[in-house]
Amino acid sequence: MTPSYTLDNIVGAVLPVAADRQYLVQTRSLRMARGILDQVGRIARQQLQSGHLLLVSDDHVFPLFGAQVVRSLEQAGFTVHPLLLPDGHDGKVEADEEGAARVEQAIDALPAPRAGLVALGSGTVNDLAKLPAYNKGLTYGVVATAASMNGYTSAIAAILAGGVKRTLPCAPPVFVVADMDLIASAPLEMTRAGLGDLLSKPVSSGDWRLSSLLLGEPFHVLPVRLVEDAYRRTQAVAVGIGSGDPESIGPLMEALLLSGISMASAGSSSPASGGEHLLSHLWDMTAPYRGRMVGLHGAQVGVSTLVTATLYQHLRQHRPTRKSVDRLLEGYLPFSDYTARLSGLPEALIPAIQAESRRKYPSQDVLRHRLEGLVDQWDILWEDLGGYLQSPRDLRKVLVEAGAPVTAGQLGIPAREMREAYRLARDIRSRYTVLDLAWELGVLDELEDTVLEESGVLAAGGSSG
C-alpha cells in the first residue's frame, strides 16, 4: 500500500519508488499558507548561503510583488540582483533557448559569493530560472505566484529548443513559498489552467502504464498514487477554484506541488504528461507561424485531455485480430513515406519533428510482434489500464464547474489546428502514448471525427467565464 504523503511530511523524505529505487525529495521547504510573502527571506536564508542572489521575474509580476520580496530577502542579508525577463512576440515571456541563455549570462555576471537564484513567477519564469541554475550549479528556490501548472517542484523544464518543445532535466528547487493570498489573486484563467494541467493525471498515468505494458518501459506505482488524495480533493472543490476561493485553491496548489514531486521521483514527466501534453506542445510550436498567441499551458492541456480520454474510451472497442494485423502490415509504410504526413506543418519545424518521430517509429517486425501480443492480451491490457483512467464525462464536468475552457475555440485554436494536432502531435516526441496505440491499430484517423465530436472540443459554444 502506498504511504500517504502531504506537503508537511514529504519534504526531504526518501520515497520508496521501487524495490531497487529510492528518491530523496530535494525540496527541503514547502511553505503554503496565507500571508507568508514577508517570510521569503527567512526561508531562503535557511536554505541558501549568504551573498549575492539573482531574482528572476518578469514585467508582469515584479511590479506587484517584487519590492516586498526584495525587501524580505535584503532583510535576511542577501544582496539582490533582479532580472526581469522581456516579453516575446505575443506580449508574454517565452520559455525558449534565448531566454535561458539570458539568465545564464546574468548568473555569470553575479558577483561572488553567489548565494543562489530565486524565481518570482509561475510556469515560464520558473522554467527559465531552474534550467540555467542547474546548468550553472546554482542552488535555486521559487516564490510561486499562481496555481497554474505542476512544474514548480519538478526536475524538468519545458523549453522551446530548435523549434520543438522539449522537457530538459534539471534540479528541483530547494524551497517553494506559496502565499495563498498572492496565489488566489492571480487571474482566474491561470488558476483554471492549473486545474486543467492537473486533470491530465488519469490519461497521462494511463499512457505511462501503456508504454510499460507494450514497450517494457519502467513504471512505478508510487509516483502515480502520490497525488491521488489531493487530486480527489481538488475535483470536489472545482466550483470554488473557478471563483477564486483561497480555501478551494489550496487543495489545487497542494496537488500541483505533489505532482511535480511525483515526476521527479519517477525520473521523468510520465506520471503527469502523456499524449494530451503533446497536443498542447504542438500548438505552442506552431503558434508563431500561424499568427496565434501561445496559450496557457494548463488550459490547453485540459481541453486536450478530453480528447485523449475520449480516444481511450473508443479504442477499447477496436480489438485486433490475426487477420486485422495482417491487413495492417500489408499497408506498412517505410518511415521516409510516413513523414509525408508532416508536410502541412511549418517547414522550419519538420526536421526536428522527424528526428523525434524516427526514434519511436517501429520496424515492420517490431510492429507485428506488438500487435500480435495485443491480440492475446487485449482484455488484460484494458483491465490494467482501467485502474488509472477516468471517463471524459467526469473530467469535462470538473472543467465546466470551474468555468475552465472545454473547447478549442475557447483556446483560440481553429478547428483545423485541433484536427492537425490530433493526427500529428504523436510525432513531436518519442514518448509512447494512446495516440501511438491508435495509430498502430490503424484507427487514429478513422476515429478522428468521432473522438473530436464526442469530446465536445469542436463545439462552437463553451462554458468558460
Image (spheres, rainbow, N blue to C red):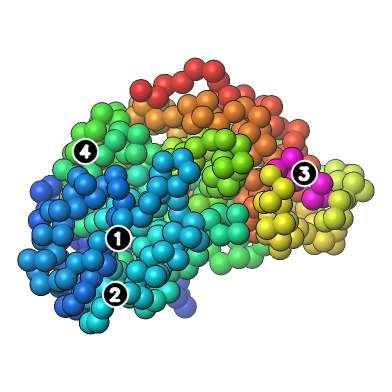
**Rounded to the nearest whole Å, what is the CA distance between mark 2 and mark 4?**
32 Å
Residue 247's x, y, as percent?
Answer: 18, 39
Q: Earlier in the sequence, mark 2 or mark 1?
A: 1
Q: Is most of the magenta stretch helix, strand or loop?
A: helix
Q: Is residue 450 left or right of residue 455?
A: right
The label number, if any, that marks residue 343 in the structure image: 3
Report if residue 198 is visible in the image: no
Q: Earlier in the sequence, mark 2 or mark 4?
A: 2
Q: Is residue 433 left or right of residue 326?
A: left
Q: Earlier in the sequence, mark 3 or mark 2?
A: 2
Q: In this picture, is 101 found above or below 151?
A: below
Residue 16's x, y, as percent?
Answer: 38, 71
Type of amino acid at the residue the image marks with label 1: Leu
Instruction: Name the residue carrying label 2.
Output: 110
Q: Earlier in the sequence, mark 1 or mark 4?
A: 1
The label number, if any, that marks residue 200 in the structure image: none
**Which SS class for mark 2?**
loop
Q: Are marks 1 and 4 in contact (CB under 8 Å)?
A: no
Instruction: Name the residue carrying label 4.
Output: 185
Q: In this picture, is 227 found above or below 248?
A: below
**Numbered range of the magenta stretch:** 338-345
